[in-house]
Image (tube, helix red, strand yellow):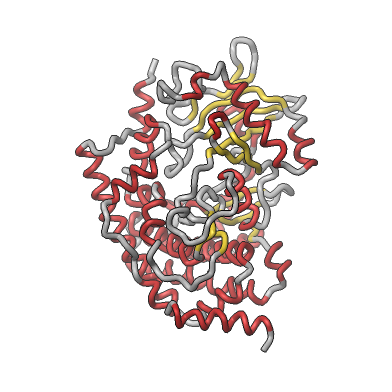
Amino acid sequence: MSLLKDRFKQGRDARKKCPRSAHATSGKAKRDPIPLIKASSEGRIKSLVELRYGRMLESPFTFYRGNALLQAHDLADTPDMGLVSPICGDSHLMNFGGFATPERNLLFSVNDFDEVHPGPWEWDVKRLATSFVVAARDLRHGKSVEDSICHELLGAYQETMLECAEQSTLETWYEAITYGDLREQASKNTLEHVQRAIDKAEHRTHAELLPKISERDNHSRLIIRDDLPEIFHLHNNTTLLDADDDWLRLSDWRPLFDTFMRDYRGTLQADRRELLSRFTAQDMTFKVVGVGSVGTRCMVALLTDEQQFPLFLQFKEARRSVLADYVRAKSRVRHEGQRVVDGQRLMQSASDLFLGWTTGPSGRHFYVRQLRDMKVSAELETFDAEAFAAYGRLCGRALARAHAKSSGYAAQISGYIGKGEALADALYKYAQGYTEQNERDFEVFQQACRKGRLRARSEADFAADHLP
């Protein structure tokens, strides 16, 4: 028997221990979600936790996006085939999108790795499939669309994993999903969405961003403009940091920036360190990001070259992965920023030119990347059923490629999945069941906010507090 056939057989044999139908179970969901939500907020900036809850209150979908810890907890006692490899950890559909390679090509892949950690590949697939059902229900597409999208997604994962299993190792390592390929393969209905994403990416550059978020101060120095609650300086009267925050003891942004840069430079390749040395720091501000990350620390630095062309670097806090307490495997990396960077480099076919990690004041861990550089995400509200299904297939392809590259187990996973729809049927049942669980958790969360167990505030509330 050839080595490849033997690996396929290993996957098929794993069905004896973990039948594919077993993946339909939703896991240990008989729990109060509020203690887990509170646990996920520990260590965050207290005032911004209220903003996090405000964003999570918007819909069951934003609630699902905002707290990956709940699903990690619930997945802990669900069956898996026994393979452990780096997984995304928070692979919901809005954590996929377009981004630029160092060669300025636009690729599509998983693009958020805050929770990356060794774990079962099935957990990523379950979080992704559920996110599509939650989103489809939130946008009122109907049960038939939920069913078809889920099966399209899982079918694409299945087909792509088989392709990877039959490729050489180098082919799997190098191959990427480009927007040029997407444009050629798009139907008339979906081509407009692909072209819109390409056009948007071309305008999401540092040069385009500069006039939107910066200005000259009274001394003609280039600074980032405060825009509460999204962007604010640490030491102005607009800061949203807690009054006793240790960062407020710093004289201004420069000591913080210098601390970040000390370790960060050493995580870059030599040529990229040389490139970075040609830029000078002009300003740095706090930036509130995402839904799940609100309340964690994120700084944006504006640097310019000799001709005053900009480079925006984002220093984003890296906390312990939400998977860490619920998986059998442990991360070999002690620095959480390095964990994120290593995972991203392993799962993407190409990564940010300036991707690296560092340690800030008080020993907090951070990873570093460019801000916004040609990054685009799906505009779900504009998707009809056909576009939604096409996006599901695309995410399924991207996740399969990421798993094949990071694990080296494409043949075993493909052998386990097989050629029929047994796994897809089970995972659709799981996604349906967990979507209903998410709705129950969302209702409990809403009640907790109404009764004062949790305090939630909107963007408008924060902005109103700081009106002149």
Is residue 300 positioned above or below 150 on the image? above
Q: On the rendered structure, is 398 left or right of 90?
A: right
Image location of residue 407, percent across then percent down = 61, 65
* Residue furthest out toward the top: 218
Whether residue 388 is visible, yes or no, is no
Q: Quadrant of residue 388?
A: bottom left
Residue depicted at x 56% and y 29%: 361
Question: In which quadrant is the N terminus drawn?
Answer: bottom right
Image location of residue 418, percent across then percent down = 52, 81
Whether residue 397 is visible, yes or no, is yes
Q: On the rendered structure, is 107 left or right of 33?
A: right
Image location of residue 242, percent across then percent down = 41, 25
Q: Quadrant of residue 460?
A: top left
Q: Nearer the viewer, residue 422 or 337?
A: 337
Is residue 448 positioned above or below 428 on the image? above
Q: On the rendered structure, is 99 left or right of 124?
A: right
Q: Quadrant of residue 303?
A: top right
Question: In which quadrant is the C terminus drawn?
Answer: top left
Image location of residue 440, percent across then percent down = 25, 55
Q: Nearer the viewer, residue 269 or 227?
A: 269
Is residue 261 positioned above or below 66 on the image? above
Total numbered badges shown on the rendered structure: 0
Residue depicted at x 51% and y 29%: 286
* Residue furthest out toward the bottom: 1
Q: On the rendered structure, is 308 left or right of 152?
A: right
Residue depicted at x 52% and y 82%: 12
Q: Nearer the viewer, residue 9 or 405?
A: 9
